[in-house]
Image (cartoon, rainbow, N blue to C red):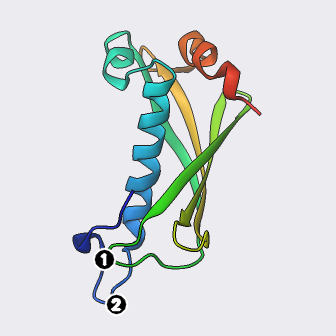
Amino acid sequence: MQVRDYECDIEGIVNNANYLHYCEHTRHLFLQQCGLSFAEMHQKGVDAVVARMNLQYKTPLRPDDEFLSRLALTKEGIKYVFHHDIFRASDSQLCFRGKVELVCLVNGRLAVSDDYDRAFAPYLT
């Protein structure tokens, strides 16, 4: 991905909230790769929601920087834990590290989702 000018603050660096957008977009692409759709899962009564985040800002990204957004996935009980790393493409500098915990609501109640478990099984570390 590439940083867009409007994502930067007056200091000329990416505003902290935009890293969350980058991570969310990465998770959505991952879901598509797994054959899942948030919209279709919602229609089935299954919603994956963010329960907790731990964010570390390392080196700022600036306008026009290209970056790589990588993730790894673990499961802790009923939580899916996405480990995000964002690297500046030009020098592989770590810019952001995040740990995002998601849980599933099935018909409005905290529960395990067989669909997510099945789709994520090949990627769980």
Which residue in the rendered view is the most extreme toward the left? 6
Mark 2 sits on what residue?
A: 11
Q: Residue at x 54, y 42 (%)?
A: 51
Give the image location of residue 16, x and y in percent: 42, 71
- Foreground pick, 49 / 83: 83
Element at label 2: loop
Element at label 1: loop
The quarter of the rendered structure image containing the C terminus is top right
* Marks 2 & 1, CB-CB < 8 Å contact: yes
Give the image location of residue 101, x and y in percent: 60, 42
* Above or below, comparing residue 123 to residue 69 in the picture: above
Numbered badge on residue 22: none
Numbered badge on residue 8: 1
- Foreground pick, 2 / 119: 2
The quarter of the rendered structure image containing the N terminus is bottom left
Left or right relative to 51: residue 20:
left
* Above or below, comparing residue 102 to residue 97 in the picture: above
User: Based on the displayed image, in which of its 4 quarters is residue 17 positioned?
Assistant: bottom left
User: Based on the displayed image, in which of its 4 quarters is residue 85 positioned?
Assistant: bottom right
Give the image location of residue 39, x and y in percent: 31, 21
Which residue in the rendered view is the most extreme toward the right? 125
Q: Residue at x 68, y 28 (%)?
A: 123
Three-letter amino acid code at disc 1?
Cys
In space, the residues marked 2 and 1 are separated at their CA atoms by: 8 Å
Q: Residue at x 56, y 64 (%)?
A: 87
